[in-house]
Amino acid sequence: MPRCLVVQHVAPEEAFAIEEALAAAGVAVETVQVFAGDPVPAGLSGLDGLVVMGGPMSANADDGFGSRRAELALLSQAVAAGLPTLGVCLGAQLLALATGGSVRRGEAGPEIGWSPVALTEACYADPLFAGLPSPLGVLQWHGDTFSLPEGGTLLAGNATYPSQAFRIGPVGWGLQFHIEVDAAAVAGFLEAFGADVEATSGGSEQIRAQTPAALAELAPIRAVLLDRFAQLVAADVIESDLVGSG
């Protein structure tokens, strides 16, 4: 059975729909909860996919982020090995950093709440984004942003932060936004990170009011994108088995 490792930094930021898509594709999901003290593996042995989730820590600092260097090393190895890899929010920033990009404080301030991102022309030939509608309404929850690593392909952006999604290598993706959330996830974000929302226009109530319609529009798009990623993870072990038996 194919195996995908999920690195979870804080309790509220689970893999949600990502894990559901992987399970539906027959992929065994193993979660490393770094907030609970689980160690990040030093290598990729036995893995067919890697997912790194979000969190409030800085991708640039070890302070309060003891697993940062191990995660950067693992992401670098995954891209070099052509392992299907997905970084979400902080995970996207770590993926950019691990592959030669940079991460900095966002000049426009925190971007929090439901907002659109426009897909680039590169999405037409992208294994995950091909055929998806643009603009795409997604949940944002970040204060930092990233620059593309050399060789990276920009897939989505908006006027506030041009770098919103990218691909590095054939099967490595970073998503600054949260496409994996459901209603319970959004409620959990608001409960855990409510202080982040106070300075935003409309605050928590606006996010709550927008969530049902935003999720209804996002759900079928999310299902396509995440199923494609899950199938890549499942196909990785199938291809490995075929090579081994040849």
Image: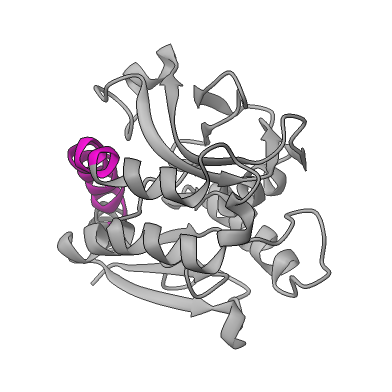
**Image mark count:** 0
- Image point (42%, 26%), residue name: 116
Location of residue 160 by image quarter: top right
Q: Position of residue 27 (x, y in %)?
A: 25, 66
Answer with left or right where residue 171 lies relative to residue 80. Answer: left
Q: In the image as oriented, which residue stretches furthest toward the top?
A: 121
Residue 227 lies in the magenta-colored region: yes
Residue 238 lies in the magenta-colored region: no
> For the stretch drawn in magenta, what is the main secondary structure?
helix
Q: Nearer the viewer, residue 53 or 190?
A: 190
Question: Which of the image's four quarters has the N terminus?
Answer: bottom left
Residue 104 appears anywhere in the view? yes
- On screen, 164 above or below 239? above
The magenta span reads 213-233
Q: Position of residue 165 (x, y in %)?
A: 51, 33
Q: Nearer the viewer, residue 65 or 211?
A: 211
- Image point (46%, 50%), residue name: 86
Location of residue 101 by image quarter: top right
- Image point (21%, 40%), residue name: 224
Residue 48 appears anywhere in the view? no
- Image point (32%, 35%), residue name: 128
Question: Which of the image's four quarters has the C terminus?
Answer: bottom left
- On screen, 58 above or below 116? below
